[in-house]
């Protein structure tokens, strides 16, 4: 995943200009532009937290996008050294994703998160997909063609909206700022808060040679309609799937069910 491109995607959808975000976090527009274009490394944790506040995102999610390892964990272990024994026990038992989900359910029941963030639940991408909205090995010459096909599938799950209107809105957003997030993945979308979120997954028969942040041709489209209560979180979670392993797994999938299983597995690994 290209962090800078993902940050630009989130910033644009939040309606925040480059200059405004730079002012909010106390950096120059030139520096922030270099980050978004991949010329500078991801900002420090403190700056990432400031960006998260400015975009109304959970800080842990943005830091995970940037670093893959949250400094909150390290900080927590410094404050509560005995917690390291719990991590060691989890590692010693080699808990899998399903077992960790049971641990998470216990924590949620016994020690619920307090505050505004607790009431805002962002669905996982696999929860927004369905076999009929997974298109594998699609042959197309242009990105717009793939968007049109995906829009037809999305329209069937969005009463009151037609495919042409959905495709037009997604194309307009794509013209405003391309949604490639690296490793051959793009997240074309139309974030309509009044529409319950739904998604389509498209893998391409041949990579599309379009402009991308890391110059890797597009291989996978995660097309999202609607945003629910937290549209930026939904986009950020989708962008986390842009890893070489996940892309390879999805490109090798031969059935929609297999592709959905790989998305579900990737999300469980990411947490």
Image: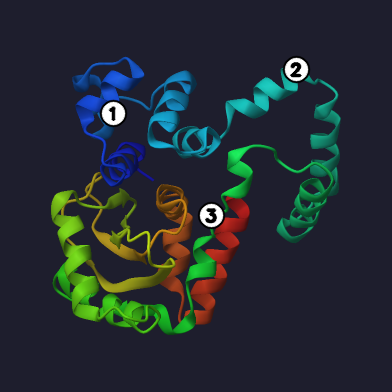
The CA distance from mark 2 to mark 3 is: 29 Å
Q: Nearer the viewer, mark 1 or mark 2?
A: 2
Q: Which residue is mark 3?
A: 122
Q: Position of residue 86 (x, y in %)?
A: 84, 35
Q: Residue at x 31, y 56 (%)?
A: 184
Sequence-first disc among 2 and 3: 2
**For residue 159, what is the image quadrant?**
bottom left
Of helix, strand and loop, which one carries label 3?
loop
Of helix, strand and loop, which one carries label 1?
helix
Residue 79 is tagged as 2
- Answer above or below: position of 265 versus 12: below
Q: Position of residue 24 (x, y in %)?
A: 32, 21
The CA distance from mark 1 to mark 2 is: 31 Å
Residue 255 visible within the image: no
Relative to residue 52, is residue 107 drawn left or right?
A: right
**In the foreground, 34 or 128:** 128
Sequence-first disc among 3 and 1: 1
Relative to residue 107, is residue 232 drawn left or right?
A: left
Q: Position of residue 269 (x, y in %)?
A: 61, 53
């Amino acid at each position: 995943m290209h962090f800078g491109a993902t940050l630009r995607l989130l910033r644009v959808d939040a309606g925040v200009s480059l200059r405004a975000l730079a002012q909010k976090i106390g950096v120059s527009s030139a520096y922030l532009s270099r980050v978004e274009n991949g010329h500078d490394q991801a900002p420090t944790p403190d700056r990432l937290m400031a960006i998260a506040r400015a975009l109304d995102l959970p800080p842990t999610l943005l830091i995970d996008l940037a670093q893959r390892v949250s400094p909150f964990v390290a900080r927590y272990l410094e404050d509560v050294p005995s917690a390291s024994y719990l991590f060691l026990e989890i590692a010693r038992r080699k808990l899998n994703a399903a077992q960790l989900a049971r641990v998470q359910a216990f924590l949620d029941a016994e020690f619920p998160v307090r505050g505004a963030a607790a009431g805002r639940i962002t669905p996982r991408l696999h929860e927004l997909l369905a076999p009929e909205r997974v298109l594998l090995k699609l042959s197309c010459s242009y990105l717009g063609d793939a968007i049109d096909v995906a829009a037809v599938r999305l329209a069937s799950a969005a009463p009151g909206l037609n495919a042409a209107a959905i495709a037009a809105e997604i194309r307009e957003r794509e013209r405003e700022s391309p949604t490639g997030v690296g490793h051959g993945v793009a997240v074309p979308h139309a974030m309509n808060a009044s529409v319950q979120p739904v998604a389509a997954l498209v893998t391409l028969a041949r990579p599309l040679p379009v402009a991308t942040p890391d110059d890797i041709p597009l291989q996978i489209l995660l097309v999202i309609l609607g945003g629910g209560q937290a549209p930026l979180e939904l986009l950020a979670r989708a962008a986390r799937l842009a890893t070489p392993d996940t892309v390879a797994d999805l490109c090798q999938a031969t059935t929609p069910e297999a592709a959905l299983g790989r998305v579900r597995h990737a999300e469980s690994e990411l947490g």
